[in-house]
Structures are given as structure tokens and as C-alpha cells.
Image (cartoon, helix red, strand yellow):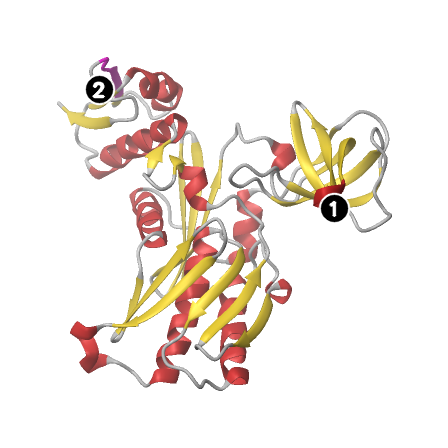
Amino acid sequence: MTLEVFLDDTPGELRAVVERNGRAEHILMERAEDPAQTRLGARSVARVRQAAPGLKGVFLDLGAGLEAFMPVKGGESPPVGAKVVVEISAETREDKAPVARRLGPGEGEPRLLAAGPTLMERLARLAPGVEPVTGREAIEAGLRAIEAARTPATGPGVRIHVERTRAMITVDVDLNAHDMGRARPRDETNRLALREAARLIGLNRWGGLVAIDLIGAGHDGKAIESAARAAFAAAFAGGSVDPASIQYGPVNRFGVLMLSVPWSRTPLEEVLYADPAGRVPRPGQAAREAVRALRLALLSDTGRARVTLRAGTEVAALAAPWVAELGPRAHLKADDAMPRTDAVIETD
């Protein structure tokens, strides 16, 4: 087993990738402007703002205009105005507020008590003792990981599609008609599919109900569950989801395994895109990726005296302070005629 870590410290965003045997398993991102109160593991004093009995919880005021949802058990709901100490157990996703769990009573105004683990602290848990690779290779590893997250996985004679809807995650295991000569026995192929499904779900930071449509029917349910537990334990080890918290159902008569993965982090596609379906980047993320492309060009051709990032006015304005951090060889040009999220690299 080969474990590699890549650390891309491009201005605007710290990004890390963990690869096992050449395949991306984790991608971590950290930005200075992300609210510390809503990051996973952050602890705060919060005020109960509104009761939500229909949702079996309450909405909290974390301070600084931020809020969270706290589930409560029957009869244990604190009154509006009460102060509680909470920890963020799941970051925001879609139109949902972050989820917090109650640690105890609180005092004083809503405020942050302790930030959640930093990217470097999380990386140390995922790959203890592994020295990160930096520079151009780290940038390229990050780009590969993002592409891998949205690409079906393949194996000898098989293709594994993992997709997320608002309701659930579906995993479809297909035998590849053009590669049938390399296909493995059914049970071995299903074990491979479980490992790849676990890897892609973790890489995309997804949670919720998962349906895995295995090859064939009449499976040994205990053997499939054991293989699934091993696959998810390996893929999630050291990460933000405890493998022991994943719930497994039986394999049904149609050959579908059901399981439930707790939500923890904001899904990768929501971090990257304003419109995940159309892969339309947020202006801030477009600026970060443009600066990353500029830094990659600078590292790839160290002899060139000047490399210019030309971008639309909105992206250029956001990128300007980060470009300045790249040194005298990096230049920026705003172009009113370019689409708002487009950017190109120009060399003189």
C-alpha cells in the first residue's frame, strides 16, 4: 500500500489531497474567510433563537449573523433565549443550516469558544507521519482529485457509477461489455465495487441514504455486509465520519444493499460550484482556480519573466490580492469583454 499526501498552498485556499495506491481518497480545503463558527468541530456558546417542534429541534444564534440547527429529544428542548454550549457535527449543505450537538449549558453572549480542527490537524490524522509533496505536483494532484470525484470508477471488466440526488446516493455496478475478457468472478467484482463506492462517497463528502445495486442476486448477505463494513472502514478511517456510525441494512431480493452514512462536511460540489448540476463556479472559487492556474504556469516555466492572468472584472478584483502574493513574475489584467467567471493564462 502506497500512501501519498499533496499540499497545495496557493494564495486564497489551502488544499490537500490524500492518495492511496494512486487513487484520491480525501480532498481537504481551507479558506481564511470561511466562518470559524460553522466549521466541523467548532465549539460555541449559542442562544436558542426559535423552537422547531416539527423538526424535533431548535434553531440557534451562533453570533456574527450565523445560525445552526440543534436536534433535541422529546421533552428536552431548551426554551427560546436559553444559552447552550454546542459543537458543530455537520456543516451546511444545500439550503440547510449546519447541525450542532449540545454539550451543556452556556453563559454570556453567543461567541466562538474553540475552532474546529485545522486542515493540517485533519491531514495528520488521515496520513500520520507522511511528508506532503508541494509545488506543481500538489496543484496537479488537487485537479486530478476533483476530476476523479465526478468520474465513474473502473476496474477489470467493471464500471462503478456513484451519483447523488436530494433524496439519496445511488451506486450502479455495470459489467463493461468492451472489457469482459478481464472481468473477475461476481463476488470479487462486487467487493471491488464496494471499495470504490466507499472511496468516491468519501471523496465527494457525501452522506445520507445509500443504495448499492450489486451485480446479480441471491447474495450471501452476511458476506456482503462484512465486505461493505471493511470497505467503508478503510475509506473513512481518520476522517470526519466515524465508520462505526454508518448503519447497514440487509441486501434485498433485488441485489441492492442499503446503508446510511452520517453527514459531516459540505459536499465537494457545493464548495466548488454555485450551480453543481451545471458546474458553474462561484465567483470566489473561479478567482481561486484562476490564481491556481497562474501559479501552476509560474512553477511549470520558471525561466519566463512574466506570466499574466487575464480575467473578467469580477474575478480579477477578487484575485488581485492573491496574485500579488505570487511575486513579481505574476501579473493580472482585467478584461471587461470576458464572461464573469472566465480566465486565461498569457505568457509574454
- Between marks 2 and 1 in the image, the one whose residue lies nearer the viewer: 1
**219, 333: nearer the viewer:** 219
Q: Residue at x 33, y 54 (%)?
A: 148
Q: Which mark is residue 150?
A: none
- Establish if 25 lies above or below 179: above
Identified by mark 2, the residue type is Met
- Establish if 24 lies above or below 32: below
Q: Say which residue label 2 marks.
A: 338
Q: Main secondary structure of the magenta part?
A: strand
Pinpoint residue 130: horizontal percent, then vertical percent.
47, 57
Pinpoint residue 269: horizontal percent, then vertical percent.
41, 43
Neighbour tally class for label 1: few under 14, some 14-19, many 20 plus, Cα within 10 Å: some
Q: Residue at x 49, y 33 (%)?
A: 31
Pointers 2 and 1 in contact (C-beta within 8 Å): no
Q: Kindly indicate the quadrant of the structure image that contains residue 329.
A: top left
Query: Is 343 placed left or right of 222 in the picture?
Result: left
Q: Say which residue label 1 marks.
A: 56
Task: Give whichever of discs 2 and 1 has the lower sequence position.
Answer: 1
Quadrant containing the C terminus is top left
Q: Kindly indicate the quadrant of the structure image that contains residue 312.
A: top left
**200, 186: nearer the viewer:** 186
The magenta span reads 331-336
Question: Can residue 256 be seen in the rendering of this structure?
Answer: yes
